[in-house]
Amino acid sequence: MPQADLRDRIREQAFDRRSPPEAGSLAEEIARLGGAHVLAVIFFGSRKTGARPGAGSAYDFFVVTAAYRAFYANLRRAGALRRPAGIVAMLNALMPPNQVSIRLRDSSGADLHAKCAVVSLGAFLREMTSARRDHFFLGRLFQPAEVLYVADKVIEQKLLDALESAHRLTFSWVRPRLPQPFDVAAYCRALFEVSFAAEIRPEPSERIQTLWQAQKEDLQKTYTLLLEDLAARGSLPPASDGLYTLREPVSRAERLRLIFYFRWSKVRATARWAKYIVTFDDWLEFIVRKAERHTGKPIVLTPRERRMPLIFLWPRFFRFLRHKGKP
């Protein structure tokens, strides 16, 4: 299958507006607040996929910026950021992305919450290639994402190149987890299983099935094109009755390299949680509400846990991880 088919499919997903109007309004407002330093706003996550978002779920965006310090200074001047711009910018440069919380009201007066993963253009493009430092970006953007704001056509083409690269790279990191033989559905499910294992996440393991079912049609169309293209290039034997096999078996060295990559990704993902305490306004309330949505159980923190969460919340956190998904 010609390369253009996969690229056209990704272009359709990324640039044909299908998102709810609230997401578009939020993206435009984020671009307005950040000014000329905002290069793109990319919509992803449960609100995008429709994977059972709760009424209070935030809208997830990647915000691609030309300059961290100037972007955060604009947010702070507009009252959309309570943290010092210089500190937040420093942390962003240290380990992108930052997560920042932006709350706005739409034209009807409804409260809208944006969870923005802020990243420079250079870091975003790097993280969508084999030179990436961990799995954070690829673990989210192998799924359908929509570009709701882009500064110009040059940036648009760079984003399209990056999203195509993210989809093509899936084959390099999912190979050890593929059954033999496998079809496109098994390929997609393996992508979720591997990506979830690369981070400590508050969602129970059943979340994988929810995400898969919500995006099944879109994912199968996209990854059918990828697998057909890999077969046409000789990386996979041609499909037989819709089933593929690996032309080259997974070597011990490849397996060890990927084990190290995903373990390192988990270390960095965990370190980001500590960073979000500084960058994300009302971080404690956010993670408590998120955990409640995914477990269906109320969580009531003690006064001591609220006053000094970094000291007294750890026992509850580890109990939560141990028992999440259990009745």
Image: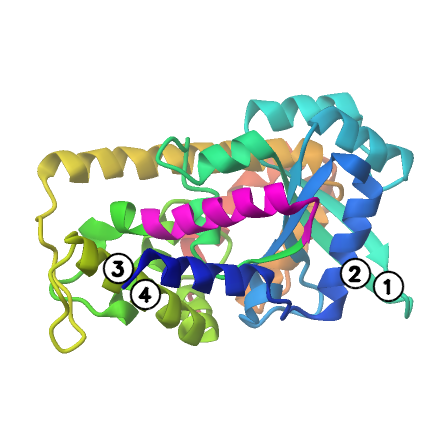
Question: From what the image shows, is residue 64 above or below residue 21?
Answer: above
Residue sitting at x 55%, y 64%: 294
Q: Which residue is mark 3?
A: 229
Give the magenta range. Answer: 149-169
Query: CB of mark 2 within 8 Å of CB of mark 1?
Result: yes
Describe residue 231's horizontal placement relative to residue 129 as left or right. Answer: left
Mark 1 to mark 3: distance in Å? 43 Å
Which label lies toward us, 3 or 2?
3
How far apart are labels 3 and 2 at the CA level?
A: 37 Å
Q: Earlier in the sequence, mark 2 or mark 4?
A: 2
Give the amino acid type for the residue marked by disc 4 in the picture.
Answer: Leu
Q: Give the position of the N terminus as an image quadrant.
A: bottom left
Type of the residue with mark 3:
Asp
- In the figure, 170 relative to 99: above or below? below
Which of the 4 image quadrants contains residue 303?
top right
Q: Residues within 10 Å of mark 1 (few under 14, many from 20)?
A: few
The prevailing secondary structure element of the residues shown in magenta is helix
> How many numbered dots are placed on residues in this image?
4
Near-viewer residue (153 or 136): 153
Q: Kindly report which numbered mark, 2 or 4, lies closer to the viewer in this rendering.
A: 4
The mark that comes first in sequence, 3 or 2, is 2
Tell whether label 3 touches label 1 (CB within 8 Å). no
